[in-house]
Image: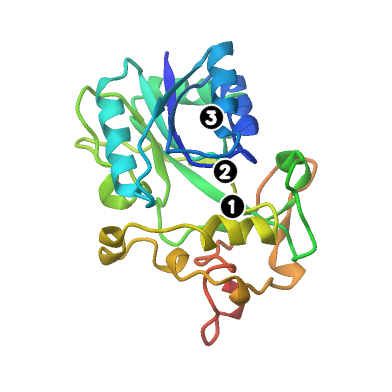
Amino acid sequence: MRIVALLAVRNEELYLARCLEHLLAQGIEVHLIDHGSTDATPAIAREFARRGGVTVESFPYRGLYEWGKILQRKEELAAHLPADWFIHHDADEIREAPAPWRTLAEGIAAVDEEGYNAIDFAEVVFTPTGPEESFEGRDYVAEMRHYYPFAPRPEHRVNAWKNLGARVDLASSGGHRVQFPRQRLYPQPFVLRHYVFLSLAHLCRKYGERTFDPAELSRGWHGQRAAFRAEGVRFPPREFFQVLGPDGRFDLSQPRRRHFFLARPTAGEAGDR
């Protein structure tokens, strides 16, 4: 079975090597779309392409973050690349199959054998716990232990699907949920570790320096991210976070509906800021 992660990146040098190493170790091939990166991202991508298992293409950057067009390009790739399954993936993510499967490829193969054609991912968000913490240049997957489950709506991350020979729809949902006829969603979610930012300075660079496509803003996309202001970031108390223990199990019982670094609290929702 051939499984391909469709990974779009722009200036992701802090994440890219760790992300690609994980995917390849999980039995997943990668098709990487470089959106005009100006840092070390292209060099990292070329090195992995040289080793094998990663292919790279360029996507023009016009001075705007054009997420809709990137998603449409992923739709085109999923309609033409010779693969059995696809994963819509970002560089700041680490995806895993639940027990008893050891790898993503093993888990997806088992899901396919049971007759399902789509997989949801339970999202757990890892961040620093205060402005003094920085995981830039470090193995953030090994070192970051504080997280919170994030689920603004049910089935929020249906990001893996079987190639049924027809074009799927990623763009309508902003990439959160792939859509296609006769979808059979596997009842147990897999795991998505989301390392949104590695330091306060990184957060400010990531969202504070991004220019969004006005057409997408008019559709209601990127609202909180487009309104991001560094001076508005307030870290919650440390008890806001869960702590990942040595058994690697996540507590998903009380998911947050908002990211604390994007949304300000409303009455009665201070814990979700």
SS of the residue under disc 1 = loop
For residue 3, which numbered disc appears in the image? none
The answer to whether marks 2 and 3 mark residues whose Cβ atoms lie closer than 8 Å is no
At 51% from the left and 47% from the top, the residue drawn is 122
Q: In this orientation, which residue lies closer to the viewer: 27 or 154?
A: 27
Please name the residue that numbered disc 3 is placed on.
Answer: 42
Q: Amino acid at mark 2?
A: Asp
Q: Position of residue 45 (x, y in %)?
A: 54, 25
Q: Position of residue 259 (x, y in %)?
A: 55, 65
Numbered disc in front, either 2 or 3: 3
Whether residue 262 is situated above or below residue 19 in the rendered picture? below
For residue 92, which numbered disc appears in the image? 2
Instruction: Quadrant for the C terminus, please.
Output: bottom right
Q: In this orientation, which residue lies closer to the viewer: 101 or 149?
A: 149
Distance CA(mark 2)–CA(mark 3): 16 Å
Instruction: Quadrant for the N terminus, please.
Output: top left
- Label 1: few (<14), some (14–19) or many (≥20) C-alpha neighbours in 10 Å: some
- Label 2: few (<14), some (14–19) or many (≥20) C-alpha neighbours in 10 Å: some
Q: Is residue 75 visible?
A: yes
Please name the residue that numbered disc 1 is placed on.
Answer: 196
